[in-house]
Image (tube, rainbow, N blue to C red):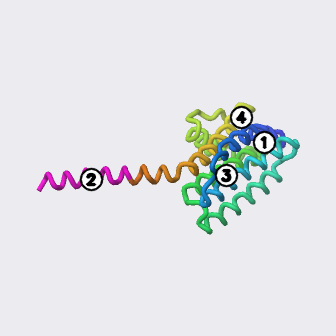
């Protein structure tokens, strides 16, 4: 299990430079700062574990618990929205499942089902379910989802503008239809 945790930590090491590049430029808006900080905390923690060779189930579990407490606080303070919170919580849950000890294999069907759904949703791949390829696949899916969350934060205003334009387009089309039907 420690080996699995270290492998996942090393794979997360590749996420840190990508996240650092995403954060360059004009800087995040004040309302996005909490979201970026939550994502950076994951990357930084796993980077430190990978560099130091430390980790293990207990250390990862403590880190994930802290990340979740920080996310709940940010949500309560309205610093992150429900979409970000739900997706962030899912990432934390997947990390916890990926390192969960299950020596008797009792939880394997449940864990594999959740990991498979996550890998399919994020990477559009079938889950490999065992060994190093599965660990790499999970780490890759987690990294992609962290990047997706960064992109979500980067594009909140653009999404709102597009949604407004979309709604106005269909409202106008509905009015034209109503006027034509009278």
In the image, which disc is placed on residue 172? Answer: 2
Circle 2: is it few (<14), some (14-19), or many (20+) Cα within 10 Å? few
- Residue 84 sits inside the magenta stretch: no
Residue 109 in view in this figure: no
Eye-nearest disc, 1 or 4: 1
Q: Give the position of the N terminus as an image quadrant.
A: top right
Among the two numbered marks 1 and 3 on one chain, the one whose residue lies closer to the N terminus: 1
SS label for mark 3: helix
In the image, which disc is placed on residue 93? Answer: 3
In the image, which disc is placed on residue 9? Answer: 1
Among the two numbered marks 4 and 2 on one chain, the one whose residue lies closer to the N terminus: 4
Tell me: 126 left or right of 164.
right
37 or 62: which is nearer to us? 37
Tell me: 31 left or right of 5.
left
- Please state the extent of the stretch shown in magenta in the rendering: 165-182
Per the model, the C-alpha gap separating discs 1 and 3 is 16 Å
């Amino acid at each position: 299990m420690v080996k699995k945790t270290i492998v996942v930590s090393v794979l997360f090491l590749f996420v840190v430079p990508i996240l650092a590049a995403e954060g360059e430029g004009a800087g995040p808006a004040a309302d996005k700062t909490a979201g970026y900080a939550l994502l950076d905390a994951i990357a930084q923690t796993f980077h430190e574990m990978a560099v130091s060779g430390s980790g293990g189930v207990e250390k990862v579990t403590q880190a994930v618990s802290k990340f979740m407490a920080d996310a709940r606080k940010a949500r309560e303070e309205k610093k992150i929205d429900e979409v970000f919170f739900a997706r962030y919580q899912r990432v934390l849950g997947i990390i916890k499942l990926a390192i969960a000890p299950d020596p008797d294999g009792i939880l394997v069907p449940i864990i594999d089902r959740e990991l498979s759904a996550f890998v399919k949703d994020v990477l559009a791949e079938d889950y490999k379910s065992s060994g190093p390829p599965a660990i790499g696949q999970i780490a890759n899916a987690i990294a992609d989802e962290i990047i997706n969350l960064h992109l979500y934060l980067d594009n909140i205003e653009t999404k709102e503008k597009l949604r407004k334009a979309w709604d106005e387009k269909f409202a106008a089309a509905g009015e034209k239809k109503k006027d034509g039907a009278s």
